[in-house]
Image (spheres, helix red, strand yellow):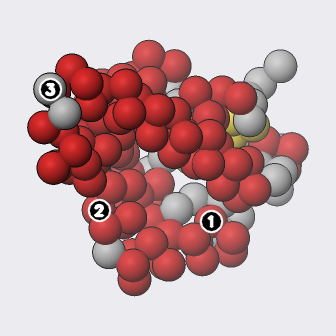
Amino acid sequence: MTPDPDMQPQFYDAIPTKRLLAWVVDTIIIAVLTLVAIPFTAFIGLFFLPFLYLVLGFAYRVVTLSRSSATWGMQLMAIELRTSNDARFDPSIAFMHTLGYTLSIAMFPAQLVSMVLMLSTERRQGLSDMILGTVALNRRA
C-alpha cells in the first residue's frame, strides 16, 4: 500500500508544485531531444515537428518511467510514481500512464480536471493516476 496521507503526510507535501516543476524540466529535455533528432531526419522532421515532439516525448516518458518510476524531471524534484500496492512502474504501467497523460494533455477539459484533482485530492493524484490507481510520492530517503 502507498503511504496513508493522514498518517504520513510528508510523502505528499508539495507534490503538485514538484510535478509542475518536473513537467517544465521534462518539456525542456524533450524539446532538446527533438532539436537533436531533426538533423537525423534529413530535416524532414521540421515538416512534422509537433508529431516528432509527441513521439519523442511519449518514448522519453515510457522509457524513464519504466526504468526508475520517474522521469528525469521527477528525479530532479525528488518524486516518483508508484502503483496502488507501492510497486515501481513496469513497462506496461509506464505505457498506460503515459497514454493517459498524453490524452489528458490533448483534451483541455481532461487536463483541467487532472490539475484540479492534483490540487484537491488527499493523495494529490491526477486524472490518469486516479484511473490507474497510481500516485506521485516524495522519494524515500
Q: Are marks 2 and 3 in contact (CB under 8 Å)?
A: no
Viewport quadrant of the N terminus: top right
Q: Is residue 53 left or right of residue 118?
A: left
Residue 110: percent from left, percent from top? 39, 75
Residue 30: percent from left, percent from top? 44, 37
Circle 1: is it few (<14), some (14-19), or many (20+) Cα within 10 Å? many
- Identify residue for label 1: 118
Q: Secondary structure at mark 2?
A: helix
Q: Secondary structure at mark 3?
A: loop
Q: CA distance from mark 2 to mark 1?
A: 17 Å
Viewport quadrant of the C terminus: top right
Q: Which mark is residue 108?
A: none
Q: Which residue is at 70% across, 48% downward?
A: 21
Q: Is residue 125 left or right of residue 62?
A: right
- Identify residue for label 3: 42
- Identify residue for label 2: 103
Q: Between disc 2 and disc 3, whose residue precedes?
A: 3
Q: Amino acid at mark 1?
A: Met
Circle 2: is it few (<14), some (14-19), or many (20+) Cα within 10 Å? some
Q: CA distance from mark 3 to mark 1?
A: 41 Å
Q: Are marks 2 and 1 in contact (CB under 8 Å)?
A: no
Q: Is residue 126 left or right of residue 58?
A: right
Q: Nearer the viewer, mark 2 or mark 1?
A: 2
Residue 121: percent from left, percent from top? 65, 69
Q: Which residue is at 47% across, 32% downward?
A: 32
| Nearest to the observer: residue 59 or residue 2 | 59
Residue 99: percent from left, percent from top? 28, 49
| Nearest to the observer: residue 105 or residue 48 | 48
Q: Secondary structure at mark 1?
A: helix
* Residue 122 quadrant: bottom right
